[in-house]
Amino acid sequence: MNLTICLKPGFNRTLFRFRLSVYLWLILLVLAILAMAPVNFLLHQQLGHLYLPENPLMPLELSLLEVLLANQALLAPYASFLLIFILISAVLFVFLSAGFFGRMLSPDPVVTFREFLADGCRYFWKFILSLLVFLPFLVLMLLLFRLLALPLNLWSEGAVSEWPVLIASNWRMLFLILLWTAFKLLLDLVRIIIVTESKKVIPAYASAIRFLRFNFFRLWGLYLLLGLAVTSISFLWRWLARLFSSGAPAALLLIIILGQAYVLFRLLARQAFIGVEYSYYTYRKGQ
């Protein structure tokens, strides 16, 4: 199959709906600020009296995990807020995902914030149910992972050097990534069918499984190809960010800009995944 048949329409759909990633980026930025503001306040309140004779930007290079482990009572007032915030954010992310899929798969290329919110409301409960139905598949994924990792575990347990342990650890990580992408592909396809064909959750799963019976490896290969491209760009981005030292204000500003640009890039990459998956699905269904 010619890859351009699916890649080009998927990328075009992403570019025409670029505003969708901007909406999500702004929402995520606000959520990050809301989550970190109490931590920042507590750190300044509890640690602000410390004198740092050099590198006034040093807190950005400190391991906050070490600081918090050394003074676990520091975040005690924040723990309840964090738990509630995580629960609300989990529900909000489902809503945002529903709006994301709804606008990405809409035949109308014009994206407005009102339509984005409307799609979030329209598909919210179906997306919640799709996650609940996905839980048995997630259990199956974990069982398969344990089965694949079993020979590696036996091999590394009898190792007399650290090399078998490192190799086995890398292989286990690779197996987990591959399994997750395969099962995540199923969830994406279910949501595409829910949005485009207005099906209920269980019929959408049935349609997705029937489709993947004959198209799994081709679509999965396409998914992995996109994932490899995104991973390569991510490593390049990380290497570029390391060229700057956070000790200089100008370099710190560039690091922040690169970080936010990377978040926007990952959102666009997610759009591309959905667009390509949808293009492949419609192409194969039309044959």
Image (cartoon, rainbow, N blue to C red):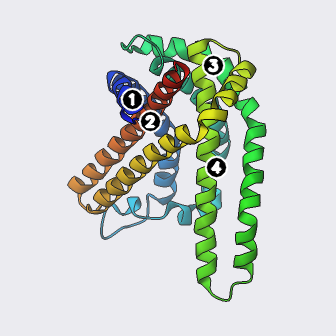
Amino acid type, mark 3: Phe
Residue 239 at x, y percent in the picture: 32, 60
N-terminal of the pair, mark 4 or mark 2, is: 2
Per the model, the C-alpha gap separating discs 3 and 4 is: 26 Å
Disc number at residue 1?
2
Q: Is residue 282 left or right of residue 71?
A: left
Disc number at residue 124?
3
Disc number at residue 171?
none
Q: Give the image quarter of residue 21.
A: top left
Whether residue 71 is visible, yes or no, is: no
Between disc 4 and disc 2, the foreground one is 2
What is the secondary structure assignment of the residue under circle 4? helix
Q: Nearer the viewer, residue 271 or 282?
A: 282
* Picture residue at 60% right of the left edge, 56% below the top: 74
N-terminal of the pair, mark 1 or mark 4, is: 1
What is the secondary structure assignment of the residue under circle 1? helix
Q: Are marks 3 and 1 in contact (CB under 8 Å)?
A: no
N-terminal of the pair, mark 3 or mark 4, is: 3
Establish if 124 lies above or below 148: above
Residue of label 1: 5
* Picture residue at 48% right of the left edge, 19% below the top: 105
Q: Are marks 2 and 3 in contact (CB under 8 Å)?
A: no
Amino acid type, mark 2: Met
Per the model, the C-alpha gap separating discs 1 and 4 is: 26 Å
What is the secondary structure assignment of the residue under circle 3? helix
Residue of label 4: 179
Q: Are marks 2 and 1 in contact (CB under 8 Å)?
A: yes
Residue 65 at x, y percent in the picture: 55, 62
Per the model, the C-alpha gap separating discs 4 and 2 is: 24 Å
* Picture residue at 40% right of the left edge, 24% below the top: 20
